[in-house]
Amino acid sequence: MSMPVLALRGLTIFPNMLLHFDVGRDASIRALDRAMSEGAPLFLVAQKDLSVSEPGFADLYPIGTISQVRQILRLPGDNVRVMVEGSTRGRLLDLVRTEPYLQGEVEELEEPVQARNTPRTEALIRSTYELFEHYVELSPRMNGDVLIQVMASDDPGYIADYIAQNIPMRVGDKQAILEELRPVRRLEKLSQALSRETAILELEHDIQGKVREHLASSQRDYYLREQLKVLQSELGEGEGDSEIQEYRDKIAAAKLPEEVAEKLRKEVDRLAKQPYNSAESAVSRNYLDLCLELPWGKKTRERIQVEAARKILDAEHYGLRKVKERILEFLAVKQLAPQLKGQVLCLVGPPGVGKTSIAMSVARATGRKLARISLGGVHDEAEIRGHRKTYVGAMPGRIIEGIRRAGSCNPLLLLDEIDKLASNIHGDPASALLEVLDGEQNATFRDNFLEVPFDLSDVLFITTANTLETIPRPLLDRMEVIELSSYTDEEKLHIAKEHLLPKELKRHGLKKSQLRITDDAIREIIRGYTRESGVRVLERQLAAVCRKAAMSIVSGEGKRSNVTAGTVETVLGPRRYHPDRRDVEPQVGVVNGLAWTQVGGEMLQAEVNVVPGSGKIELTGNLGDVMKESARAALSYIRSRASRLGVEPNFYKTRDIHVHFPEGAVPKDGPSAGVTVATAMVSALTGIPVRQDVAMTGEITLRGRVLPIGGLREKTMAALRNGMRTVILPADNMGDLEEIDPDVRSALRFIPVEQVDEVLANALLTPTAQSVPPELGQVPEQSTQPRGTVDLKQ
Ligand code: ADP
């Protein structure tokens, strides 16, 4: 029988079975078409070598299956999907054609018919069932339905064909079953193949099981962990574990007091329960970081040796003899009684006189770390004591922050500008500071943010201030005050030469030989470019000189710079300050007064004009109440003494008096201008000129007594700076002259006075009044200003 032949690659079809497969080869598609169009059978036969694309007769197995094409489905591209049904076995006798498709001569093969199954056959069938059942169980790809189909039949040939069709086996094995025509033999062959396949499946299972077991034991953890990580990162909770552990380790490693450690451990527990990115966790983390950063119990070795300290102080500071002595005394006490705690030094003086740098030297001399805390403008208690950590942006107070910066628990904390503390409705920072400075309380200082006590008892506190007047009394009482005062020009010269200039040279990378600056040049800088009590501006001007020198050396103008008094202007530009062109001629109604301000002494002129009028008094020049009252007291005194002073007795009805202090923008206050105003008024009323080389200071009473004043040292320096020769001062202040710089003392003449009359006698050109005893009983004796009130200026 001649029919089209289709060569199968890797497939076998058995009689009575349906098979779907895709066909791609051109010859195969043509063969299919041919069979389909003629309704003729098609011979399907496996090819021996799958790689042969155009098989000939020798490439095909001899036995195949005569089949019917049931369906052809054309797929996109040239492929065709086909469904065929096997009918009977056939033998390919010959290929009659190979173009355009294979056409072969096929002989149909009859199967021997068997009447009944022998028991042996039956047994074979059963055992095959069982085997197949087991196989289906093991094979993940097999559907349970195939079993039912097999069970329904007792034909060994069919069973063999069916099973062979449905299980994956090597093509060679399938072909062997196809070629076996005797049904029982065929089933036997199948059974053998099946049992081999089953054994292979069992082995596969075994291997897979073992692999899984291995994974379970050694890699399960790893997988779980990896999965956990993925989940956590999906939830944004990564790093959680290691972070918590890190905190725990740090707490264990730090030398914390038990109370603190306990508190921190609780905080870590709380952190562990919070989502990673929550606001609360940020607060906790911030808190833990800060607490762990604090130097709990971490001390630097303190060394107190007065002699060594003296060397350091002397090496770093010119002059300041008394200040250094006081500091060394303080250290000596500390050396002898280290257990004595809570002493606080307060360095008071104008800006730039070396308060900060003295404190730094003390830190160096005692081997303590130093942290500066500025208190200027602090008006909220929380700035000292911190905010509770639940506040948004909460931070510890400045004290704890200072400790953190210092990095040891026994540093020197320098509290700058303690006189500039302010208080408002948010509480009084001064009282918080009291607790900080109090040796009894500060061992358990509680910062609101920290919540746990921190021991401040080993801290050495040094405070600085420009004036004692505005320091709250309780604070002042707790401190040991050391005053630093203005420098004279000569002192400034020494400081500049011995300290500032070497520092600036080094800072600017200059060698000593590269910048020569004469003493006169420095004097010129001090006089013409600075007007200050300290040496800050001087330091800046010297820095400017160094910059210029560095510039000229770098730009190749010369190898070295020489600065002399004559060339200062070319370096620093025109002079800033000129010696006051003061009238040296005696003047009517103009008197030189001396004032003390936070930035040092100053000379203030009082001017008085008297014009016809109705007895009005006008006080201008931005005067404070105390100063105004002091002027009225002066007026009152003059009225009570009018005739003796040579003043027209009715002047207070017929004249208007105007008292003015120049530089009206600068606020002035205090009682110490009393004598100045009185003298100016008398001069203006009598027309007697006042000597302009005389300066004065002193408070007056209604009855003309002159009361002592403060700030004498600064005031006398201002007098000298302004070219005065004579200073009239209250007799009670004579004792203070000891304090005054020897240079100043020898350059000035001092006239101590007890009464205003004596002032007038010395200041007015022609004495108008003799010393007259006060008219007792006329006016009760009374100071113009109760003592002890706070004056900004005296
Ligand atoms: P304050 O704290 O009183 O405002 P600083 O300590 O900041 O003043 O001093 C300003 C500069 O002047 C610093 O460089 C300091 O070293 C220097 N200085 C002040 N007084 C002296 C002195 N007596 N000897 C050496 N240098 C000084």
Image: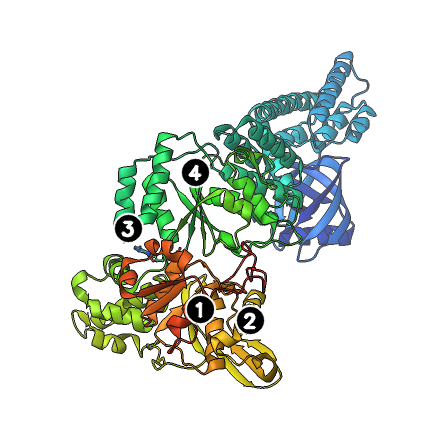
Q: Is residue 215 above or below residue 744?
A: above
Q: Is residue 459 above or below residue 708?
A: above
Q: Quadrant of residue 215?
A: top right
The Cα–Cα distance between marks 4 and 2, rounded to whole angstroms, is: 67 Å
* Displayed-image quarter of ligand 1: bottom left
The Cα–Cα distance between marks 2 and 1, rounded to whole angstroms, is: 13 Å
Q: Are marks 3 and 2 in contact (CB under 8 Å)?
A: no
The residue that appears at 65% across and 39% down in the rendered structure is: 11
The Cα–Cα distance between marks 4 and 3, rounded to whole angstroms, is: 24 Å
* Residue matched to label 1: 757
Mark 4 or 3, nearer chain start: 3
Q: Amino acid at mark 4?
A: Ser
* Residue matched to label 2: 640
Q: Amino acid at mark 3?
A: Glu
Q: Secondary structure at mark 3?
A: helix
Nearer the observer, disc 3 or disc 2? 2
Q: Secondary structure at mark 2?
A: helix
